[in-house]
Image: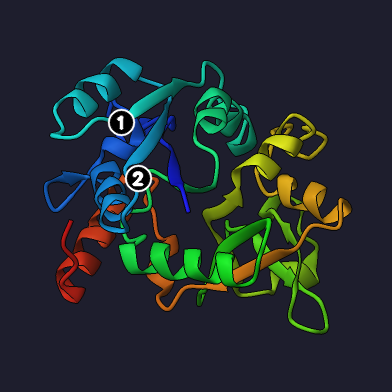
Amino acid sequence: MNKCAVILAGGEGKRMKMNKPKPLAEVLGKPMLEWVLNSVRNAGIENICVIKGFGKEYMDDFLSSLDFVVETAYQAERLGTGHAVMQAKDFLKENKGSVVILNGDAPFMDSNTIKDSFEFHLSENNAATVISAKVDDPTGYGRIVRDENGNLKTIVEQKDADEKTAAINEVNSGGFWFDTEKLLSVLGEIKSDNNAKEYYLPDALKLLLKKNEKIGAFTAKSPDTVLGANDPAQLKELEQIALNKGYRC
């Protein structure tokens, strides 16, 4: 089965007090994006496209320093995760099969989680599989809403969650597996009719469900897979977690 990866790395690092893209902020001396790239490659995925945006020249410099080649696509405006993936349309058309989409600023998304979620994705014959995690504090994350049988019903973003939904502690890690052709079939249908006026990638799941496609959720063993950093204090927390748990890039 052909596999590829799209990594979202266009975020700004302003709150990090750096003029580079946020995914280039370092944990234990390595950019968070490098952690993700290594996990993807250790999961056996060689065809990779990085979506760059803010500070693209810094991203180009970093990627050119690696000892392997990745493709890039440019997101001129930051209009959400769905919009970011739209910029990789040509890459997706060239890489049929399955695609994993990951955030470039989630350094603890490990290769075992990527591999295990792919096996789940295939075994369940899913059109799409979201990688979820159960966390103590779900604030800020999209909530995984399941039906009475435990099947994925929808993902609700923090900004759109009512009180009951906000209490759910199973959250979207930002990682997804898709059947590439089925993703392409709905990518252009994603709308920005939400509170943030952004194109959410999870809306692709809703569109696939409307077409009676099968959607699943794979729960990662570690809640750390969802962790990222938005400011220097959170970055220090990631470093401490990495030291305490013996994580290695």
* Horizontal relation, residue 187 to residue 17: left or right: right
**Percent of width and height locating residue 59:** 29, 24
**Percent of width and height locating residue 80:** 61, 34
Furthest residue in direction front, as rendered? 1
Above-or-below relation of 121 to 234: below
Quadrant where the image shows the C terminus: bottom left
**Percent of width and height locating residue 192:** 77, 32
For discs 1 and 2, the disc positioned in front in the rendered view: 1
Q: Which amino acid, by three-letter code, is at mark 2?
A: Asp
**Percent of width and height locating residue 23:** 33, 39
Q: Is residue 123 visible?
A: yes
- Pointer 1 local density, CA inside 10 Å: few below 14, some 14–19, many at least 20: some
- Which of 165/191 is in front? 191
The image quarter in which residue 240 lies: bottom left
The residue depicted at 65 percent of the width and 56 percent of the height is 128
Label 1 and label 2: CA atoms lie apart by 27 Å
* Horizontal relation, residue 65 to residue 177: left or right: left
- Pointer 2 local density, CA inside 10 Å: few below 14, some 14–19, many at least 20: some
User: Circle 2 sits on which residue?
Assistant: 231
Q: For the residue labelled by badge 1, is the local secondary structure a helix, a strand or a loop?
A: loop
User: Circle 1 sits on which residue?
Assistant: 70
Residue 204 has which mark?
A: none
The image quarter in which residue 129 lies: bottom right
* Horizontal relation, residue 90 to residue 20: left or right: right
The residue depicted at 58 percent of the width and 72 percent of the height is 123
Above-or-below relation of 39 to 188: below
Sequence-wise, which precedes: disc 1 or disc 2?
1
How many numbered marks does the figure carry? 2
Q: For the residue labelled by badge 2, is the local secondary structure a helix, a strand or a loop?
A: loop
Q: Is residue 53 visible?
A: no
Q: Which amino acid, by three-letter code, is at mark 1?
A: Val
Above-or-below relation of 215 to 7: below
